[in-house]
Image (cartoon, grey):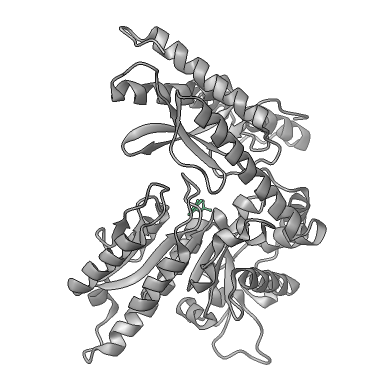
C-alpha cells in the first residue's frame, strides 16, 4: 500500500467477510510476500486511515514517527514489564515516564503504571477508591464488615456525559447497577458543582457512602472539562476520592498555551491519561497516576515464581506490584522515544493546533443557520446537526442526520462521528489530526449539506431545505 487518498472505502462487512472467510487458515502460503499481498487485499485496501485529514469520527490520532520506530523495537525485543527480571531498563524507563507525568499533573511524590487504555486506567482508579472507602468504613465499625456487606452502599458520582467505562467499572467492582449517580451538567456540558453538592448531600442523608467522584477533563463527545477545583473542594469536604478522567484532555499536560485548562487536576487522588489519544501515540498507551503511592498497595499480590513477598537477595522494582496486568507491553518506550526526539512542547503544539482548528470550525458552523452546533468547544470536538430551514418533525431530522453520517461514510470521502444529545441524533467531528485544515472542514460541512438536501428531496412528502 503505497498511499491512500481517502480515510475509508465505505465497504460493507458482508463484502469484506466474503474475502476473509475464503482464506483457508490450514493451508499456509509459505511465502511472506504473498501473505503481505493478501493482507493488503483483506485489510489495508479498505482500512480506516486515521492519518487522512477527513477522518473525523472518533478519538483516534495519526501517530508520530518516533513512536512507530519504537514499536519495532518493542515488538522485536518483546520485554514484559511485569518484573525487573523480564525487563531491566524497561522498568526504569517506564518509571521515569510515570514520574514525569505525575510531575506534570502536580503529584510531586506520585506514582502509577502504564495500562492498556483509559478504560483500564479508570477501572484501576475506581478499584483503589473502593478499597480506600472500604478500609475507612471497616475502621469506623466495630463489627469490621467484610467487603460484600459494604459494596451495596457505595456510590460513584460522574456527570451525565462521563465515559461509559465508569459504569463498566462499577459493574466489575461489584457495586451494583444503582451505584453510579449521574450528576447533571450545565449548558457547556460540564458537571454542575451545585448539583454534585446536592447529590453528595442526598447520599449522606440516605446513609450511603460516597466512594468516588469521577470528574472528566475532556468528555468524549464535547471535550468539556468539569470544574476540577470546585469538584475537588466538594471531595475534600466529604472525604471522597477524586478520580480525574483525563483520557482525552491529558494532552493539555504538555500544551504550551492551554495547560491552565487542567487547573485543579493536582487535587485529584488518581488520574487517567491516554497517550494514545492526545499524545499521538500508537494504540496502546495509557497510564493511571496516583497522588499517594501507598494507594497502589491495593493491587499488590505476590506469587513465589514472579514477585515473591520476601525476595531472595536485593529487592528489585517489579511493576506488576502496581498493575492489574501481568505480562505487559513496553508501551512506555514509544512515549520515551517521542519525548527524546521531538520533545514535549512539540507534542503539545500538535494538540494545540487541533484545538485551534475546532474553534475555527465552530465559527463556520455558527455562520450557517442550518448547521446547529451544541457547544463552543474547549478541546477538539464539534457536535452539531443539520436542521432544515422549514419546520420538520423531530424524528425526520434525526433520520436525516443519521442518513448524512451513513452516506458520507459510504462515499469514503470523510468519516464523521455520531451521537445523541438530549434525545436527538447529532453529527460529530473529532479533530486529532494536525494536518486537517479549515478548508477540509469546510468541504466536509458542504458534504453534509449536500447529503442532507438529497435526503430531503427524496423524502416522500418531504420538506424542502
Ligand atoms: C477514550 C476515553 C476513555 C476510554 O479510553 P480507552 O483508551 O478507549 O479505553 C475513557 N474516558 C474518556 C473521557 C475517553 O475519551
In the picture provided, is 37 more to the left or to the right than 278?
Answer: right
Quadrant containing the N terminus in the rendered view: top right
Quadrant containing the C terminus in the rendered view: top left
Name the one closer to the observer, 255 or 404: 255
What residue lies at 70% left-to-right and 46% top-to-bottom?
Answer: 63
In the picture provided, is 385 more to the left or to the right than 317?
Answer: left
Name the one closer to the observer, 19 or 336: 336
Residue 7 visible from this viewpoint: no
- The vertical placement of 203 against 420, above or below, is below
Q: Quadrant of residue 263?
A: bottom right
Q: Position of residue 388 (x, y in %)?
A: 39, 19
What residue lies at 48% left-to-right and 57% top-to-bottom?
Answer: 119
Q: Quadrant of residue 148?
A: bottom left
Name the residue furthest right.
341
- The vertical placement of 72 against 336, above or below, is above
User: What is the total number of numbered labels drawn onto the structure image?
Assistant: 0
Q: Quadrant of residue 79?
A: bottom right
Residue 253 visible from this viewpoint: yes
Q: Position of residue 126 (x, y in %)?
A: 41, 68
Q: Position of residue 38 (x, y in %)?
A: 68, 30
In the picture provided, is 438 more to the left or to the right than 66?
Answer: left
Q: Position of residue 40 (x, y in %)?
A: 69, 30
What residue lies at 56% left-to-right and 30% top-to-bottom?
Answer: 364
- The vertical placement of 253 against 1, above or below, is below
Amino acid at each position: 500500500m503505497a498511499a491512500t487518498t481517502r480515510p475509508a472505502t465505505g465497504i460493507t462487512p458482508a463484502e469484506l467477510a466474503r474475502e476473509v472467510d475464503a482464506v483457508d487458515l490450514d493451508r499456509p502460503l509459505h511465502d511472506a510476500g504473498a501473505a503481505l499481498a493478501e493482507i493488503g487485499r483483506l485489510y489495508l485496501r479498505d482500512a480506516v486511515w486515521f492519518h487522512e485529514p477527513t477522518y473525523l469520527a472518533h478519538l483516534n490520532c495519526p501517530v508520530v514517527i518516533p513512536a512507530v520506530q519504537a514499536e519495532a523495537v518493542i515488538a522485536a525485543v518483546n520485554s514484559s514489564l511485569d518484573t525487573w527480571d523480564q525487563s531491566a531498563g524497561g522498568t526504569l524507563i517506564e518509571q521515569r515516564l510515570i514520574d514525569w507525568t505525575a510531575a506534570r499533573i502536580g503529584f510531586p511524590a506520585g506514582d502509577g503504571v502504564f495500562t492498556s487504555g483509559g478504560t483500564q486506567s479508570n477501572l484501576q482508579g475506581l478499584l483503589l477508591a473502593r478499597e480506600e472507602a472500604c478500609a475507612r468504613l471497616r475502621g469506623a465499625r466495630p463489627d469490621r464488615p467484610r467487603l460484600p456487606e459494604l459494596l451495596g452502599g457505595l456510590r460513584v458520582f460522574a456527570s451525565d456525559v462521563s465515559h461509559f467505562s465508569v459504569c463498566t467499572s462499577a459493574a466489575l467492582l461489584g457495586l451494583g447497577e444503582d451505584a453510579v449517580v449521574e450528576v447533571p451538567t450545565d449548558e457547556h456540558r460540564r458537571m454542575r458543582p451545585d448539583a454534585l453538592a446536592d447529590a453528595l448531600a442526598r447520599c449522606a442523608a440516605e446513609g450511603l457512602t460516597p466512594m468516588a467522584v469521577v470528574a472528566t477533563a475532556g468528555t468524549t463527545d464535547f471535550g468539556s472539562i468539569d470544574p476540577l477545583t470546585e469538584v475537588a473542594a466538594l471531595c475534600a469536604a466529604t472525604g471522597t476520592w477524586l478520580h480525574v478522567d483525563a483520557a482525552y484532555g491529558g494532552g493539555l499536560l504538555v500544551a504550551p498555551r492551554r495547560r491552565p485548562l487542567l487547573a485543579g487536576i493536582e487535587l485529584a487522588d488518581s488520574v487517567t491519561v491516554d497517550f494514545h489519544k492526545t499524545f499521538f501515540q500508537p494504540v496502546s498507551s495509557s497510564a493511571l497516576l496516583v497522588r499517594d503511592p501507598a494507594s497502589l498497595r491495593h493491587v499488590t499480590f505476590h506469587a513465589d515464581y514472579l514477585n515473591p513477598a520476601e525476595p531472595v537477595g536485593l529487592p528489585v522494582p517489579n511493576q506488576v506490584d502496581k498493575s492489574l496486568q501481568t505480562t505487559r507491553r513496553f508501551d512506555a518506550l514509544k512515549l520515551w522515544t517521542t519525548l527524546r526526539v521531538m520533545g514535549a512542547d512539540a507534542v503539545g503544539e500538535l494538540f494545540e493546533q487541533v484545538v485551534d482548528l475546532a474553534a475555527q470550525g465552530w465559527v463556520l458552523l455558527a455562520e450557517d443557520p442550518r448547521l446547529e452546533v451544541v457547544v463552543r468547544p474547549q478541546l477538539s470536538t464539534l457536535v452539531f446537526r443539520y436542521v432544515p430551514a422549514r419546520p420538520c418533525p423531530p424524528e425526520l431530522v434525526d433520520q436525516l442526520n443519521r442518513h448524512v453520517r451513513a452516506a458520507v461514510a459510504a462515499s469514503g470521502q470523510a468519516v464523521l462521528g455520531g451521537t445523541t444529545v438530549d434525545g436527538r441524533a447529532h453529527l460529530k467531528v473529532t479533530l486529532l489530526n494536525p494536518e486537517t485544515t479549515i478548508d477540509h472542514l469546510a468541504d466536509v460541512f458542504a458534504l453534509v449539506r449536500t447529503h442532507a438536501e438529497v435526503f430531503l428531496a427524496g423524502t416522500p412528502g418531504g420538506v424542502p431545505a
